[in-house]
Image (spheres, rainbow, N blue to C red):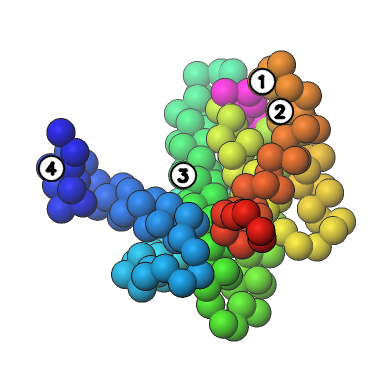
Amino acid sequence: MILAPEDWPLIIGNSSDICDMRTIVCLSTLVHSSAHSSISSSLATTREAYRATKESLVELRRFVAATDPDATGIAVTSSLSSFLPSTGHAFHQRHLGIALFMIIVQNCVLQRYEEDTAELEQEAYNFSIEVFDIANKAQCYRPLGASYALLCLMAAYMGMTEAVARTEILSLYIDYRRDFPGEKPAHEDEIEMRKIYNLLRFGPVTKGR
């Protein structure tokens, strides 16, 4: 059985998750559409999701700041007394990181369709710097508690156009990647990230293109 978008609330109670699912479907349509395809509905949904995600970032940042061990004076250690506070901070930090991942992907796709991309480009830069900062601060939760940072750093790499900052993001990504060694060397992931960025920003490559 295939569920239609209007059926999603039946299986997901969180309105934010429903919005994310709809956005993912719309992003898939935009990413794999040619420039002449009828994408007005998906583009409108993605624009609205981008706006909503920017608004949610404000609240997520507030939660992260309120539970930041540096601000609360609670050191992140293995002791029981710091476990719950640090767990709360790690949870909100992860939520913020994933939201930044989503908005950078949305941003890259919107840059492909919007006529004036100056504001989007600046926002992509700012979001990528924010991800880099989160990934640095999340190192105390490595490996599993900060595993999401890999995904976020991939997005930050794609959203960053400044060469030096992009190199620093890639370096931190490779460092995090050592927590989860695989058959493929970490530095080869850069090739895949460039391919994903080109797909998001410019669309699928077709014959003769």
| Quarter that holds the N terminus | top left
Q: Residues within 10 Å of mark 3 (few under 14, many from 20)?
A: some
Given the image, on which type of amino acid does mark 4 rest? Leu
- Quarter of the figure with residue 164: bottom right
Residue 69 is labelled as none
- Classify 74 as above or below 113: above
Left or right for 60, reference 127: left
**Can residue 44 be seen at all in this image of the molecule?**
no
The alpha-carbon separation of the residues under discs 1 and 3 comes to 21 Å
- Classify 138 as above or below 108: above
At horizontal 75% and vertical 40% (from top left) the residue drawn is 190
- Classify 135 as above or below 201: above
The magenta stretch spans residue 141 = yes
Pointer 1: what residue? Answer: 180
**Of callouts 2 and 4, the N-terminal one:** 4
Pointer 3: what residue? Answer: 95
| Quarter that holds the C terminus | bottom right
- Quarter of the figure with residue 122: bottom right
At horizontal 59% and vertical 18% (from top left) the residue drawn is 78
**Residues tagged 1 and 2 counted as in contact (Cβ below 8 A):** yes
The spot of residue 129 in percent (x, y) is 70, 57
Given the image, on which type of amino acid does mark 1 rest? Phe
Pointer 4: what residue? Answer: 10
Q: From the viewer's perspective, is the residue at label 1 or at label 3 nearer? A: 1
Near-viewer residue (147 or 59): 147
**Of callouts 3 and 4, the N-terminal one:** 4
The spot of residue 134 in percent (x, y) is 64, 46
**Of callouts 4 and 1, the N-terminal one:** 4
The alpha-carbon separation of the residues under discs 2 and 4 comes to 37 Å
Q: Residues within 10 Å of mark 1 (few under 14, many from 20)?
A: few
Q: Magenta region: which residues?
A: 140-144
